[in-house]
């Protein structure tokens, strides 16, 4: 199976705190992507990290990739109420993505 | 703005009554995807087109079909919807190519209700 795991399933933090979400996978990937989904909406791409990269930044987002451990993490710094959403990692295999179950993040103001 | 458009946003159908969902894109991307997403679950890939080349996932039920008449449009046909097919259906596109998949651009989704 190409599935992996994400944790935590849900995360509740105060505005201003950092949020870390983790993603693991079982088989070798091309690249790994992170997406955000607001309730009842489509997904929005956040970051793509290639298999030969170890870390990538975009604004308040930081993604790491450890191919030896087959894991990735997404860090959101200085969280805002508007960051409340579901976050999915997606493993890239050929021309398709396999999404994990996601982490539901709630940022309380 | 370049985008992915899905119609309708909400679709109600009766058990067994065929339904067609549509997706259009102005991004001129080579690859188009259909995902099914049930409540609190991950999006599940049903099939994708790389240009005209159709790729069906092994576990996609025969009840689901797709058509891509041109680069811009892609349709999802559900021939005999069952109660278990109630879900959000997401269309997405990507550029594709040798450099890898690249990011996918998602439409807002069509929420299907089966009565």
Image (tube, coloured by chain):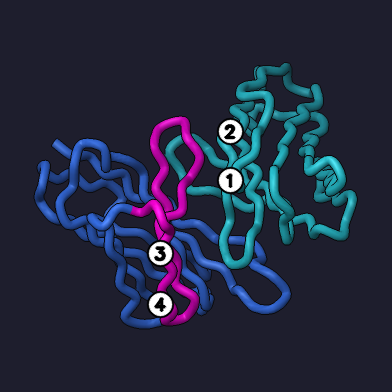
In what element is the residue under mark 3? strand
| Camera-side mark, 1 or 2 | 1
Q: How far from the left and from the top, in percent, is residue B13?
A: 14, 45
Precedes in sequence: disc 1 or disc 2: 1
Q: Which residue is mark 2?
A: A85
Q: Is residue B90 visible?
A: no
Badge 2 crowding class, 10 Å Cα cut-off, few under 14, some 14 to 19, many 20 or more, is some
Q: Label 3 marks which chain's residue?
A: B
Whole-number angstrom distance, CA of label 4 to CA of label 1: 32 Å
The residue located at (30%, 72%) in the rendering is B67
Whole-number angstrom distance, CA of label 2 to CA of label 3: 30 Å
Q: How far from the left and from the top, in percent, is residue B10?
A: 27, 46
Q: Which residue is mark 4?
A: B72
Residue B59 belongs to magenta span: yes
Q: Which residue is mark 3?
A: B56
Q: How far from the left and from the top, in percent, is residue B76?
A: 29, 62
Q: Label 4 marks which chain's residue?
A: B
Boundaries of the magenta span: B35-60
Whole-number angstrom distance, CA of label 2 to CA of label 4: 30 Å
Marks 2 & 3 on one chain: no
Residue B57 belongs to magenta span: yes
Q: Which residue is mark 1?
A: A1
In what element is the residue under mark 4? loop
- What chain is colored blue? B
Q: Is residue B65 visible?
A: yes
């Amino acid at each position: 199976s190409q599935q992996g795991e994400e944790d935590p399933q849900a995360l509740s933090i105060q505005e201003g705190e950092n949020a870390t979400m983790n993603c693991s996978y079982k088989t070798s990937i091309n690249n790994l992507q992170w997406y955000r989904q607001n309730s009842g909406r489509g997904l929005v791409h956040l970051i793509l990290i290639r298999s030969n990269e170890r870390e990538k930044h975009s604004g308040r987002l930081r993604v790491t990739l450890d191919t030896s451990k087959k894991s990735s993490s997404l860090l959101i710094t200085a969280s805002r109420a508007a960051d409340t959403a579901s976050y999915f990692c997606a493993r890239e295999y050929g021309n398709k993505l396999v999404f994990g179950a996601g982490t539901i993040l709630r940022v309380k103001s | 703005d370049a985008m992915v458009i899905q119609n309708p946003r909400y679709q109600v159908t009766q058990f067994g009554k065929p339904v067609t969902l549509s997706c259009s894109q102005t991004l001129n991307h080579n690859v188009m995807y259909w995902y099914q997403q049930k409540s609190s679950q991950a999006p599940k890939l049903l099939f994708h087109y790389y240009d005209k080349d159709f790729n069906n996932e092994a576990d996609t039920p025969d009840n689901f079909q797709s058509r891509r008449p041109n680069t811009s449009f892609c349709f999802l046909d559900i021939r005999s919807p069952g109660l278990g097919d109630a879900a959000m259906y997401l269309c997405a596109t990507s550029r594709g190519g040798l450099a890898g998949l690249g990011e996918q651009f998602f439409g807002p989704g069509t929420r299907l209700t089966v009565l």
